[in-house]
Amino acid sequence: MNDPENIVETVIDTRARDLVDGFKVRRALPSRQRRMVGPFIFLDQMGPELLREGRGLDVAPHPHIGLATVTYLFAGELLHRDSLGSVQPIRPGEVNWMTAGRGIAHSERTPQEMRAVGSDLFGIQSWVALPTQYEETDPTFVHHDASELPIVEDHGKRVRLICGSLYGARSPVRLLSDMFYAEVILEGNARLQVPIDYEERAAYVVEGSIGLATEGETFHAGQLIVFKPASEIILNASGQARLMLLGGEPLEGRRHIWWNFVSSSPERIEQAKDDWKSGRFSPVVDETEFIPLPETGPVVVRYP
């Protein structure tokens, strides 16, 4: 029998906080306990939130460098616009993957037609830091419909592979580093073995609760469980549960983060701050407002 202290590195408890206009998010990464898991440097749970008639989520245009943003929804709909001219709605089971590279600006908003009737919104927003050689790559945006993402089903478990390779399936999402990301739904008494193919692995519990098949410890919604490298992990669920599996190989060197900017160079972040403040980012299509650079924002955090 495995000792949980030998297979679980840390457990991160998230807390609800306001994003905009009272809309709640739960932040799992970065945290004091763990700054990154593989290339994942940011992980927010959005909602679940009931957007009543006339109300919507409005994240006005803002900039990014040195990362890829990954939006994945369980319920609701968002409209993505960016400075490349992309205009793309995203719905449950689909993926929006935006590689910022040397710089991009975008917005995410509830579509006007959904504001008229009200809707739920529930999903995960994550950032993937880019390898050093790709930090200044040209920005890109790609969308994949739910039908394009592989689904693996077996004995009470359903895995939708967002990116990378797992359980014999491969996602069509083009990657710049070795990583994986998947949505998992477990029925009661189902068991899930977490592959040991990647050095860094974690599970974020979205709904319900999960346990380690060899131990009595239970993990609940809003917790990120980071596993130790090469440890054999089998998860189980007493009732239906939803979780995200994520991880990959650690990136080379440190990463610095300030507001929406990620880079291996603090000087590059300073340049991006000045570029946004001075209006040197390309504008977002069909948008007139923007989020100003924070005058007193988070300090640069060094991620080993």
Image: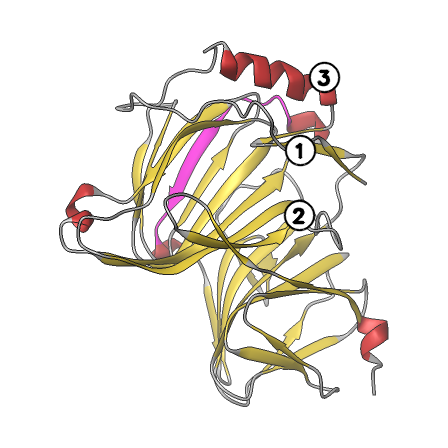
Relative depth, front residue between 30 and 234: 30
Q: Name the residue carrying label 3.
A: 267
Task: Please report contact status of discs 1 and 2: CB closer than 8 Å, yes or no.
Answer: yes
Amino acid at dot 3? Glu
Q: Which residues are magenta?
A: 135-145
| The image quarter in which residue 251 lies | top right
Q: Secondary structure at mark 2?
A: loop
Mark 3 vs 2, N-terminal side: 2
Q: Is residue 18 above or below residue 211?
A: above
Does the image show residue 245?
Answer: yes
Image x and y of residue 92, in percent: 34, 58
* Residue 144 within the magenta-colored segment of the rendering: yes
Q: Earlier in the sequence, mark 1 or mark 2?
A: 2
Disc 1 marks a residue whose amino acid type is Ile
Query: Is residue 290 placed above or below 110 in the rendered structure?
Result: above
Report x, y in % for residue 252. Answer: 79, 37
Q: The C terminus appears in which quarter of the rendering?
A: top right
Which residue is pictured at 15% across the width and 46% down the height? 113
Q: Does 115 appear above or below 289?
A: below
Q: Place residue 201 in its image quadrant.
A: bottom right
Give me the C-alpha separation between circle 3 and circle 2.
21 Å
Residue 148 drawn at (x, y percent): 39, 54
Return the residue at label 1: 257
Disc 1 crowd, CA 10 A, few/some/many (<14, 14-19, 20+): many
Instruction: Report the side of 149 relative to 135 (left or right).
Output: left
Residue receiving disc 2: 30
Under circle 1, the secondary element is: strand
Find numbered disc 3 in the image and state the secondary structure of the residue it sits on.
helix
Mark before the other along the chain sequence, 3 or 1: 1
